[in-house]
Amino acid sequence: MQAMNTFGIAAVAQQFVRIEQCEQLAVVRCDPVLSGLPRLVLGGGSNLVLPDSVPGLVLQIALPGREVVAQDEDYVYVRGGAGENWHEFVQWTLELGLGGLENLSLIPGTVGAAPIQNIGAYGVEMQDVFHQLTAFDFNSGQSLTLNKEECCFAYRDSVFKRAYRARMVILDVTFALPKAWQPRLAYADLARTLAQQQIDAPQPADVSAAIIAIRQAKLPDPQVIGNAGSFFKNPIVTTAVRDRLLTHYPQLVSYPQADGRYKLAAGWLIEQCGWKGKSLGRAGVYEKQALVLVNRGGASAAEVRALASAIQADVQARFGVELETEPVFA
Ligand code: NAP
């Protein structure tokens, strides 16, 4: 499965089925051997750390399809099959002249994986434009439609990482893209890039092009260096914790949240602990962005875990802040 996970771990699956038609899921569910195995549902494998040997059944979701399904006064509704490449899907909506997904350009992975961790970047989360999704329920054998509330979206989180993990397989996702589009330019890198390009009134495609340029400059291309994007969530702390840290570290990077707490930049905490560019075994911390762990060549899940744990321990010891990992450990 080395080519099926962006971290490039040379994992071997006990059983493997590629799902290209929804009907195959019902067949798998009734199969006397496959139905009894633990399941791992695989999209683009971009937010995943695999063990060398994956026990049970790996289901690779490769369901295709893109269509404009409806529109009303306020929104155009577009649907993508779960197996569609996320970035290509975003580009397709932009080619149709539809805005809403541009800040999420160039995120690796598939359309079906996007709701699982409620992907987010540059001030936009997938839930901001999510309408509904269809999923196959392995418990009942039925397909059902889930709305935003039922998906329990949170920061890089949803019900699919929790109660529905391995139970539900997302088949397709529908997004509501606003007809009255407004650019979301709050992130400094984005505003700076557009200003450098002297674009005062950006269109969705301009924002997408700027995001692509920023990401290409800052983040490692998984085709070149194995990685799973941001490896840790940005911790959210109380005002008291943030104020205590500020007295010791006036340079602390933090952002106020709607609930009165503060988000700390995990990358900054890791960098302060001296991990940027360092390695432990064959796993390392990316030179240009300390939030990204990389495969220096042949890294195993155990090496990645060891590096992540060492970073977590150092950040805890120095700042008293717990870092939570973002990718799924299979
Ligand atoms: P950055 O611009 O260096 O900023 C560092 C952190 O500060 C980010 O993680 C971001 O939090 C937060 N931040 C920056 N400006 C903010 C603002 N105006 N308001 C609120 N929070 C702000 O971040 P970066 O590492 O280059 O990443 C840029 C964006 O791409 C971020 O949104 C990041 O989450 C996203 N990204 C995600 C992944 C992934 O694998 N999940 C990988 C790469 C980049 P948030 O992370 O909460 O936005």
Image: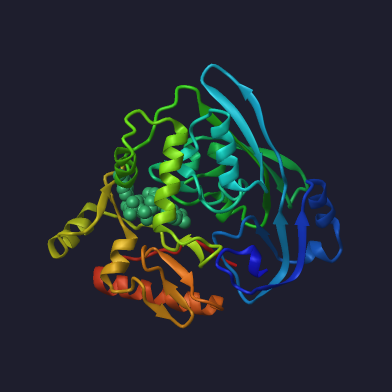
Q: Position of residue 246 (x, y in %)?
A: 16, 59
- Please tell me which residue is depicted at 29% across the width and 68% down the height of the picture: 271
Q: Residue 78 vs residue 285: left or right?
A: right
Name the quadrant of the C terminus: bottom right
- Most extreme residue toward the left, as rendered? 247
- Most extreme residue toward the bottom, as rendered? 281
Q: Viewer-proximal residue, 152 or 127?
A: 127
- The answer to whether one can see residue 162 in this image is no
Q: Quadrant of residue 280?
A: bottom left
Q: Viewer-proximal residue, 319 or 1?
A: 1
The correct choice, above or below, for 297 with respect to 49 in the image is below
Q: Position of residue 284 (x, y in %)?
A: 43, 74
Q: Position of residue 37 (x, y in %)?
A: 75, 66
- Please tell me which residue is depicted at 71% across the width and 51% down the height of the picture: 62
Name the quadrant of the N terminus: bottom right
Q: Quadrant of residue 166?
A: bottom right
- Most extreme residue toward the front, as rendered? 197
Q: Position of residue 55 (x, y in %)?
A: 70, 72
Q: Quadrant of residue 192?
A: top left
Q: Viewer-proximal residue, 216 or 163?
A: 216
- Please tell me which residue is depicted at 56% across the width and 55% down the height of the picture: 161
